[in-house]
Amino acid sequence: MQKRTRLIGGALIVALSVLAAGVSWFLFVTMNGGIYSIILNMRSRPNLDSPDLQRARTRLEEQIDAEFSWAMEKSSFARYQTSKQDSCYDGVNNWKHQDGFAHRCTLRVTNFYGFDGDFRNAMLDFEKALLAAGWHSNIHDMAWSLTNNSAVAQDRPTGRPANQYPDFINPYYKGGFALDIGWAQRGETRLFHLENTQAHNIGWINENNFYDQRKLADVGDVFREVTRDHTYIAAIAISGHYFEN
């Protein structure tokens, strides 16, 4: 009888141990976003000195330059300075957030342009050039942005004569590229949208950076340079990824 009791007790302990291990594994997998996320989080960061990585970056920069040429081919915008941000960062994959990648390297190139005339017409013409070059907006087109985002600008004094227009435009996309637009007008003092356009300043991205090389323009200097010649300044950034695992 005692032997049988010991066997039953031993079996019960084993069953409870297996159950506890199963529950612990389930909680571990769940809290880490599932099996796929666990596998992603085990992947190594890229070797930043790798020739393959450097070639990929150079190739992407050439592609971005070509995209600028096609998009601005028929534009009346006058080009001024260029800035670059080259960054690599860890993806976030857990029960709260799923990036779907372990690590990513992104190159962002920003050109600053000056232009004049009617702001709305100039931006609509620029969108036509973007569409002709194969870009599209996943959210709203330029006309919608200029009309429906206007309340954002009107709610805060900017000193902008044309303050019926917002100081940010919804992004455009083409393949693996994203295009962002920030702008300002002569006489303004609020230039943070120009600053934000030329660099990834989203908090969680900066926190996860393990490489961040910036050759950025001094926004105040380029603003003064452009607005000596033109009424408006636009910061147009094209970004793409040259590594992801």
Image: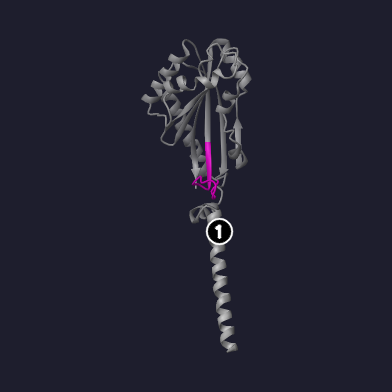
Q: Main secondary structure of the magenta part?
A: loop
Image quadrant of residue 204?
top right
Q: Position of residue 87 (x, y in %)?
A: 57, 38
Instruction: Report whether residue 39 is seen.
Output: yes
> Who is closer to the viewer here, 155 or 171?
155
Task: Classify the position of the N terminus by image quarter.
Answer: bottom right
Left or right: where 49 falls relative to 177: right
Q: Label 1 is placed on what type of residue?
A: Leu
Q: Position of residue 190 (x, y in %)?
A: 61, 19
Q: Which residues are magenta?
A: 92-106
Left or right: where 8 falls relative to 60: right
- Is 40 above or below relative to 193? below
User: Few, some or many C-alpha atoms within 10 Å of disc 1 (few <14, some 14-19, many ≥20)?
Assistant: few
Give the residue drawn at x 56%, y 75%.
14
Q: Position of residue 73 (x, y in %)?
A: 41, 20
- Is 229 above or below relative to 108? above
Q: Is 99 part of what is drawn in magenta?
A: yes
Give the residue drawn at x 47%, y 16%.
77
Q: Position of residue 216 (x, y in %)?
A: 60, 27
Residue that badge 1 annotates = 27
Q: Residue furthest bottom?
A: 1
Q: What colour scheme governs how the chains and residues are painted in the rendered image of this protein?
A: one colour
Q: Is 181 part of what is drawn in magenta?
A: no
**Callout 1: helix, strand or loop?**
helix
